[in-house]
Image (cartoon, grey):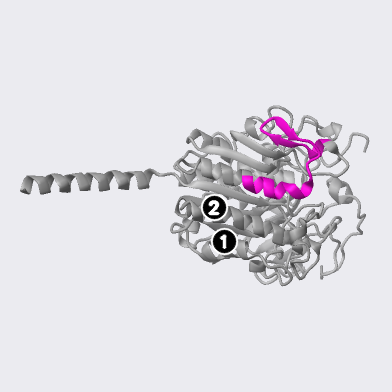
Amino acid sequence: MIKRLFLLATILLSSFYVFGQKKTNYKPNVIILFADDLGYGDLSCYGAQDVQTPNIDALAKEGMRFTDFQVPSSVCSPSRAALLTGRYPMRNGFPVAQHEGEKHKKYGLHPDEITIADVLLKQKYATMAIGKWHLGFKKGMQPIDNGFQYFYGLQSNWVKNKSQLKQLYNNREIVQKNVPYESLIKNYTQKAIDFIETNKENPFFLFLAYNSVHSPIIVNKEFIGTSKGSLYGDYVQELDHFVGKLTYVLTENKLEENTIVIFLSDNGPAICNFGGSAGSLNGGKYTTMEGGFRIPAIIKWKGKFTKGENNISLSSMDLLPTIANLIEAETPTDRVIDGKDITSILTSGKGKSPHKFLYYYNGANLQAVRKGKWKLHLPRTLKDQPFWSKKMMEKPFKGRNLKNISCKGLEVLTRPLLFNLDIDMGELTDISKKHPKVVKELLLEAVRIRVELGDVNNVGTDQRVPPFKDIQVKNFEN
């Protein structure tokens, strides 16, 4: 009897040990939900009054909601390239938005770049990209050339009068031409659910890049009139609905404790075009004001990461090294990774920003440098601007209060402007004359980083140059 009890105890202890080992070595699933043009003030958990986003709000309540989370570009292609590679767009070779014209036919994510998907694929993750790619679509530039085993989505933006941009792909194959725009978000969500349920027994990485809430503002009829705001508000609530359908599947399949969910936007709202809100921030898409670079961001890993509001200044580039650390993979060591491992901040909710400086480029033009609470906007001319910022023909700003600047931001600036973001996150009052030493330090840093990353009129020592001349110009004839 004693021998039997001893044998039973040994078996139980062995089973407990094996179970413990499996739990310790289990690698978490990773889901990145990447909204398009969603502003800092567009969600109810970020203070929106005319829309209700209960599903995204639930993520924020169950996870960490960031108030100072930055992207390295205020337009989509460079922001996507930076998130996936952990590198500034000037460093990874993708400083301007990619378009379908002749000039950009060889422009895509460089084959030497290493993406989050590449890192996770080496760790035997199932990897899938769904939605908007917008990083080049010639062979060698597509998602399945960049670490994703599967792709379902569009080349870039859906454009009504361009049939090529309304083609829906499954990997490299066109599966539907002239796809109705309003069908995309439901299709994307179902593909994502299928991928999750197929791979729930092994680790997976899902990069779901919504076309929402980018133009066109076409909303499925069941969501029209559901918000207190405009059709745009209905559009945001439609996005929230489908985020909820996806996150429910994690709960239903008991995957919440094994899955890191990251929700963020690629840049600020397109306030020049159709609305959206940057909340208390100034500017939006196309600008280097905070409204273009500071975005809504939420990260949740149930039982592992802390909850609540977090005010530490972080970057979307931090995702690559952080995810690599969490799955015990190697971060690339043969290149500069601008992102930093923020695991300790996610698990404790405390710490300091890992970034001594942050750089705000508009295309290839360095327009601002930040150190902690200090942000310095740099002089620039209209010729310095990328093609999306050349139309307003703004006169130089000469005052102190920026309350009524153009929706395209400060296109022409003859002198540096300094802001204390701790007390003026709206960048309304220039205080450069009161802090000359801070201005000098940040101007010197601008000189230093231009040598490394480049600018409109010079190539940096660690700049990957796109395969065409005149980076800021859209077409050859311009």
Amino acid type at circle 2 is Val
Q: Nearer the viewer, residue 336 or 126?
A: 126
Q: Position of residue 107 (x, y in %)?
A: 76, 33
User: Secondary structure beneath disc 1?
Assistant: helix
- Which disc, if any, is residue 249? 2
Q: Residue at x 49, y 63 (%)?
A: 349
Q: Residue at x 10, y 45 (%)?
A: 4
Q: Nearer the viewer, residue 25 or 403?
A: 25
**In terms of image quadrants, where is residue 431?**
bottom right
Residue 34, relative to residue 162: is it above or below?
below
Circle 1 residue = 59
Q: Position of residue 142 (x, y in %)?
A: 68, 33
Residue density around tag 1, few if under 14, some if 14–19, many if 20 or more, within 10 Å? many
Q: Residue at x 11, y 49 (%)?
A: 5
- Which disc, if any, is residue 118? none
Q: Is residue 425 magenta?
A: no
Q: Which residues are magenta?
A: 164-190
Residue 462, relative to residue 303: is it above or below?
above
Q: Earlier in the sequence, mark 2 or mark 1?
A: 1
Residue density around tag 2, few if under 14, some if 14–19, many if 20 or more, within 10 Å? some
**Any part of residue 426 in sight:** yes
Amino acid type at circle 1 is Leu
User: Secondary structure beneath disc 2?
Assistant: helix
Tell me how many marks there are: 2
